[in-house]
Amino acid sequence: MVYEAGALDATLAAAAGDDQALFLELRAAFLESLNRQIDLLRRARCDANWEIAALRLRGLGSSFQAWPLIALAEDALKAAPGEPVVIRKLQAFAEDFAAG
């Protein structure tokens, strides 16, 4: 899944206003939270832990109107814990966001 910088960055810019430092801080916080939840998914050994991490990812995506992330989180909710395809797609999303 390709990260679309426009929509998410526009949401962050709207929240930060003209404050570039705040924009960068919000972007970094989003990425940190994203990576933390992906790590929790990767380490999940039971349905409950997997579901909690997936729900947090969906909430993160919803908070910032990151529709591709919401879709990936929905895929995770439908998948079995440890599903490598889901984790790879989420990791690719995070890497694309970090590079963007």
Image (cartoon, rainbow, N blue to C red):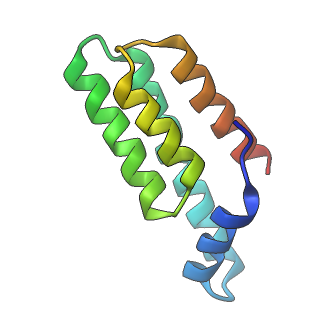
Residue shown at 33% from the left, 17% from the top: 44
Residue 74, quarter of the rendered image: top left
- Give x and y (percent) for residue 87: 53, 22
Residue shown at 43% from the left, 53% from the top: 60
Residue 88, quarter of the rendered image: top right
Q: Is residue 5 above or below residue 2?
A: below
Q: Residue furthest left?
A: 48
Q: Nearer the viewer, residue 84 or 43?
A: 84
Q: Is residue 30 above or below residue 81?
A: below
Is residue 20 toward the left or the right of residue 32 in the image? right
Q: Residue furthest right?
A: 99
- Give x and y (percent) for residue 27: 62, 60
- Give x and y (percent) for residue 100: 79, 51
Q: How many marks?
A: 0
Is residue 81 toward the left or the right of residue 88 in the image? left
Residue shown at 63% from the left, 87% from the top: 17
Is residue 70 toward the left or the right of residue 97 in the image? left
